[in-house]
Image: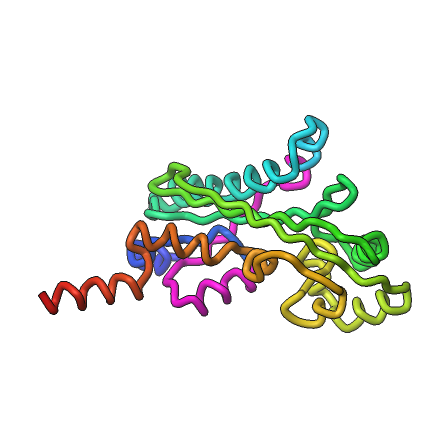
Amino acid sequence: MSQPFLSNIPTFDFVLASASATRVKILENAGLKFYKYPVSIDEGAFRAAAIAEAIPAQDIAVMLAEMKAAAAVQRLNTEHLVTPSYVLGCDQILVCDEIIYSKPTDISAAKSQLSTLSGKTHRLLTAAVLFQHGKRIWHHLSVADMTMRPFDDEFIDFYLEQLGEAALLSPASYQIESIGAQLFSQIKGCHYGILGIPLLELLAILREHDLSPFDRKSHNQSQDNL
């Protein structure tokens, strides 16, 4: 990372350990100030080992989110000699018929996932873990029940053709904020959680730690009026 990062990081009390454009947009739209610092971990190997040990899917999601946050803290410490005040890690896991699905590796895998999930209700687990000064202080698991309407191979082919490479960015090629809405007949769960981040719960913990610019402004105005 270049020198501007080192000069800017003290301004950012809050770091997002994710490359997700959707998560970035959600946080930006909520008025939060943060620094995006994506990290890479071997999710596939960890997930396979966890499944082999019969670890529940919800625990796997939380553990992966924690690993991402911890990896960001370690890299910032080691490579940049910086420890941001707060680091957020996130992860999503899709479960159907006790099988865990991750992001498809190619369009063929995306088609296979959609074909398997067609006409079924599956569960989407979204985990978020927050670190403060290098230590985990909070986590939340958002659970959504997602029912896909029945569709045939022709529909899947057309859907994936329209979606393009974005089909590889989420389990079952959701992109529910766009044409992915065409896949579903019923959804039960938090909209933000489905998009990849349990925003309302996150905002609550950030307010507790004075990381909401709106609440800081309101508090300062109240103090000025005393």
Quarter of the image for the C terminus: give it: bottom left
Residue shown at 85% from the left, 56% from the top: 115
**Closer-to-camera residue (141/5):** 141
Q: Which of 154 and 96 is in front in this view?
A: 96
Left or right of 214, for residue 178 = right
Q: Which residue is drawn at 48% across and 41% down?
A: 71
Which residue is pictured at 63% across the width and 41% down the height?
Answer: 43
Left or right for 136, reference 56: left
Q: How many marks?
A: 0
Q: Looking at this rendering, what residue extends furthest in the left direction?
A: 226
Give the quarter of the figure containing the N terminus. bottom left
Q: Is residue 118 left or right of residue 139?
A: right
Residue 178 in picture, x, y percent from top left: 66, 71
* Picture coordinates of residue 94, whole percent (x, y): 69, 48
Q: Is residue 60 above or below residue 203?
A: above
**Per the image, is 42 magenta?**
yes
Identify the colour scheme used. Answer: rainbow
Vertical relation: 51 (above or below) 171: above
Above or below — where is 101 with respect to 107?
Answer: above
Residue 198 place in picture, x, y as percent: 51, 54
Magenta stretch: give its range. 20-46
Query: As drawn, which residue projects farthest toward the top?
Result: 53
Left or right: 91 with respect to 70? right
As rendered, which of 2 and 165 lies closer to the eye? Answer: 165
Q: Residue at x 17, y 65 (%)?
A: 222
